């Protein structure tokens, strides 16, 4: 069943063409979910793809489309760090400073970039080109230290390569990430992809790199296998007996912790 576009008097300041395009895209997002309000997260990326951040108008638009309050939209938009509440640069340069990347040089990279660009965390250069961020983890520890530009990977960075990358971005040059897409797109373009609209570039990724597969290759060469699960136990012949799959809720009480009244229970209540 196709959802009908929401027709409502808008409090936003979008012009008619922008509002019509946003409404069509938002309606397509809402159609993906049994409950339309489940589309709030991609819808926030959608308005970010237009405004470059989650603006006042973007919040009002989402609220009007989904029939919820602006406060409810704001509560979500301020919770997740990928939603920006002030204008973002053309490129978000995120430096991983979590444990492994930090040890491998992530902190030094961030400090060098901060000094070189003249901005701190979540601040944007005067030309609007780069917003610099500290990132908790880029999920690429096998390539540490890692920098991401609009969530495209730049692996095994140094302070020198990172500053050179930033300079190229500010000059408007085409920049190719280490892995993934063939080039870096803008923050607005990436926001539209995160809203769930295909940009036709999914096949540009060359696939998993050698550092990611190194452990698997070594394990296969040496015949290593993963240990059995916690429910497995050896029998008297040394063979492994694995229990049948089942829910723990179906297990009968067998230990004091299964039957004793907890601190949050009153006498006479069932322990759960």
Image (cartoon, grey):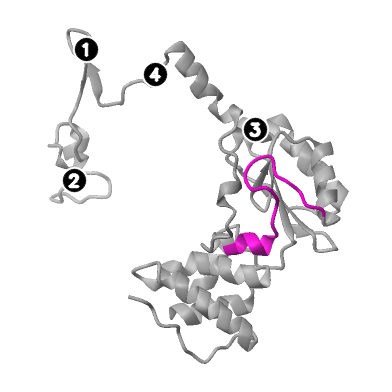
Label 3 and label 2: CA atoms lie apart by: 48 Å
Q: Estimate how packed mark 1 is, as few (under 14), some (14 to 19) or many (20 or more) residues with alpha carbons within 10 Å.
A: few
CA distance separating discs 4 and 2: 39 Å
Instruction: Say which label, 3 or 2, has the lower sequence index.
Output: 3
Could you tell whether 231 is left or right of 211 in the image?
left
How packed mark 2 is, by other alpha carbons closer than 10 Å (few <14, some 14-19, many 20 or more), is some
Image point 69% across, 68% down: which residue?
86
Which mark is first along the chain, 4 or 3? 3
Q: Quadrant of residue 187?
A: bottom right
* Residue denoted by label 1: 239
Mark before the other along the chain sequence, 4 or 1 = 4
Where residue 232 appears, x then y in whole percent?
A: 25, 22
Query: In this figure, which residue is indicated by the disc labeled 2?
Result: 271
At mark 2, the secondary structure is loop
Q: Is residue 115 visible?
A: yes
Which residues fall within the magenta stretch?
A: 173-192
The residue at 64%/50% (across/down) is 151
Q: Is 187 a magenta residue? A: yes
- Image coordinates of residue 224 in percent, x first then y, are 42, 15
Q: Mark 4 points at which residue?
A: 225
Q: Name the residue under label 3.
A: 143
Q: Is mark 4 on a helix, strand or loop?
A: loop
- Closer to the eye: label 4 or 2: 4
Q: Report how far apart the C-alphas of labels 3 and 1 lie in the structure.
A: 40 Å
Mark 3 or 2: in front is 3
Residue 105, quarter of the rendered image? top right
Task: Decide which of tag 2 and tag 1 comes sooner along the chain.
Answer: 1
């Amino acid at each position: 069943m196709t959802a009908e576009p929401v027709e409502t008097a808008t409090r936003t300041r979008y012009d008619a063409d922008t509002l019509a395009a946003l409404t069509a895209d938002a309606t397509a997002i809402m159609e993906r979910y049994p409950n339309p309000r489940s589309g709030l997260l991609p819808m926030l990326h959608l308005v970010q793809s237009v405004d470059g951040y989650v603006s006042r108008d973007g919040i009002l638009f989402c609220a009007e489309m989904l029939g919820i309050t602006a406060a409810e939209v704001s509560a979500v938009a301020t919770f997740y760090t990928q939603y920006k509440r002030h204008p973002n640069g053309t490129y978000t340069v995120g430096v991983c400073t979590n444990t492994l990347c930090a040890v491998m040089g992530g902190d030094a990279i961030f400090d060098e970039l901060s000094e070189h660009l003249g901005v701190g965390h979540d601040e944007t250069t005067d030309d609007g080109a780069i917003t610099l961020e500290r990132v908790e983890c880029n999920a690429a520890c096998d390539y540490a230290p890692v920098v991401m530009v609009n969530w495209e990977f730049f692996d095994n960075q140094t302070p020198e390569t990172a500053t050179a990358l930033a300079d190229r971005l500010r000059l408007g040059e085409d920049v190719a990430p280490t892995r993934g897409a063939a080039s870096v797109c803008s923050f607005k373009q990436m926001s539209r992809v995160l809203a769930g609209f295909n940009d036709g570039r999914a096949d540009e990724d060359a696939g998993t790199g050698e550092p990611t597969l190194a452990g698997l290759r070594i394990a296969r060469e040496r015949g290593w296998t993963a240990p059995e699960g916690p429910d497995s136990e050896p029998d008297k012949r040394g063979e492994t007996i694995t229990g049948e799959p089942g829910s723990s809720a179906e297990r009968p009480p067998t230990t004091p912790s299964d039957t004793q009244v907890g601190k949050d229970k009153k006498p006479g209540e069932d322990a759960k």
